[in-house]
Every structure is written in C-alpha cells, then in structure tokens.
Image: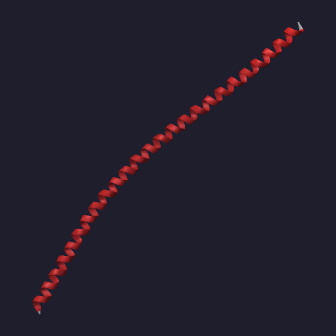
Amino acid sequence: MDDLSSRLDRIDTKLDKLTDAISQLARIEERISHQTQNMSQLDTRLTDMEDRIRHLEYQSSTRGVVLSHIERFGWLLMSAAIGLAVYYLRGES
C-alpha cells in the first residue's frame, strides 16, 4: 500500500510539472502571437514609409526638372537683356 501511495505521489508530481509546462507553453504562444502581430504592424508601417519616400523622390525629381527649365529660361532672358543693352549702347556711340 505504501508503494502505491508513493507511486501516486510521483504521478501527481509529474502531473503538476506537466500542468506547469503546458501553462508556460500557453504564455510563450501568446508572446509569439503578440510578437507576430507587432512584426506585421511594423511591416505595414515600413511599406507605407517606402511608398511615401518613393512619392517624395518623384516629386523632388520633378521639381528639379522644372527648376532647371526655369533657371535656363532665366539665363536666356538675362542673356537677351544684356545683348539688347550692349546693342543699344553700341548703337549710340
């Protein structure tokens, strides 16, 4: 009888350990689920940021082209004004 009692105690101890292990596994699974959700949110944010950066790069390059055309037109006007000024100043002398 004493042998049976000690055996039941060992089984009970093992069941307690198994219960603790299962509860730890549940906590670990919850943490993993939370981390996976966080990674998904970070991935979404990263994708949004990449899209915004692409849009800004496109705007920047477009503005650069427009500004270079405006600058060229400004130099053309300035050259024409200087040419006309020189032409009129030479014509007077």
Q: Quadrant of the C terminus?
A: bottom left
Q: Is residue 67 above or below residue 16?
A: below
Percent position of residue 29, x then y: 61, 29
| Quarter of the rendering containing residue 59 | bottom left
**From the viewer's perspective, is residue 38 above or below residue 22?**
below
Return the x and y of residue 26 as percentages of the image width and height. 64, 26
Residue at 35%, 50% in the rendered image:
55
Q: Left or right: where does residue 12 sit relative to residue 62? A: right
| Image spot of residue 34 (x, y percent) | 57, 34
Q: Is residue 59 left or right of residue 85?
A: right
Which residue corresponds to the image point at 68% horizontal and 25% vertical from the top-left?
23
Residue displayed at 36% across by 54% down? 57
**Residue beneath the point at 52% across and 38% down:** 39
Image position of 30 with respect to 68: above or below: above
Count how many numbered circles sit on residues in the image.
0
Of residues 25 and 3, the one nearer the viewer is: 3
